[in-house]
Amino acid sequence: MDELTGIGIRQLSYFAEVAEAGTVTAAAEQLHIAQPSLSQQIRALERRVGTPLFHRRPQGMELTDSGRVLLEGVQRAFAELTSAVAAARGLPRQALVGVCSGVPETVLRSAEAALHEHGPLHLSLERVSSQDQVGLLRRGDLAFGLLRLPVDRTALTVRVISDEPLGVVVGSAHRLAARTALTWDDLADQQLLWFPAGRAPGYASQVLAQLAEHGWSPVLVSVDHSSHTLFRHTLSGRSDLVALRPRHAVADDPGLAWRPVGPRAPRERLALTALRDGPWAKLIG
């Protein structure tokens, strides 16, 4: 414990806030303390640790290699301490879960059941894109993520919850709706209703690469269609527009038709994730 002498929780929380904010000024505003006082605390921590934790750049504070190592340890320690305090109180642990858009109810229930396998949890669900979940998990701001693969798995534990083939979705009046199954040649003259790729860049790149391998490189119509009503409205009445979705995206909507496409249709994989060295990883490992 000698290594911790003179280092307090408040000092470590100040350090983590500066690392997150990127500048002492922004961190001081968040913490509601004076900037000179915060700078003194950071310098005192560096003296106690025995090495610089930040590079002081004109544009702000950048973590050194030592600073990144310390930040990872602080995040794990704070997460463990939060969990331990909740357990000591005898209350169900509180866990914030990021959920990407388009997750069906059946998959969401499967994810919740998996998380309750090791004991009671109080889960709070928050809509967060797959891309943003990765950073929030590593910083300890999320306990779990429910996201689309692939993502950068560095420092993460991943458990696949759903693995479904993508099919073609069209409006019910579209000429392709009369077919029972489709080939890639059937889509040659079709545009593709797509989502803002920044939400899940790994998934977007993978699917588009697979389409190109099948000889289809469609014009993309990018729309924020997280609402099913908007999704259906965009497809209806268009003879040159299709979407790619798992079967559950259509369900029993009479205004839409889902048709399998092949050969070798791309797949959508949804997974539970947690920080590998964090206190929650064992619940999905």
Image (spheres, rainbow, N blue to C red):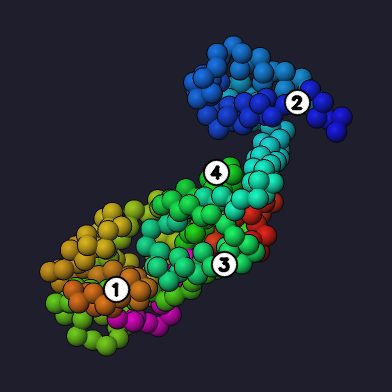
Asked if marks 4 and 1 touch (Cβ < 8 Å), the reply is no
- Which kind of residue does numbered mark 1 sit on? Val
Does residue 252 appear left or right of residue 100 in this picture?
Answer: left
Q: Which mark is residue 141?
A: 4
Q: Residue 63: x and y, percent?
A: 63, 31
The residue at which mark 3 appears reads as 114
Upstream in sequence: badge 4 or badge 1: 4
What is the CA distance from the residue labelled 4 to the residue labelled 1? 33 Å
Q: Residue 218: x and y, percent?
A: 29, 66
Q: Is residue 125 magenta?
A: no
Mark 4 closeness class: few <14, some 14–19, many ≥20 residues within 10 Å: some
Which segment is the magenta one? 259-271
Upstream in sequence: badge 2 or badge 1: 2
Q: Residue 190: x and y, percent?
A: 23, 70
Q: Quadrant of the C terminus?
A: bottom right
The residue at which mark 1 appears reads as 250
Which residue is situated farthest in the top direction here? Answer: 36
The residue at which mark 2 appears reads as 7
What is the CA distance from the residue labelled 3 to the residue labelled 1? 25 Å
Q: Nearer the viewer, mark 2 or mark 1?
A: 2
What is the CA distance from the residue labelled 3 to the residue labelled 4? 20 Å
> What is the quadrant of residue 61 in the picture?
top right
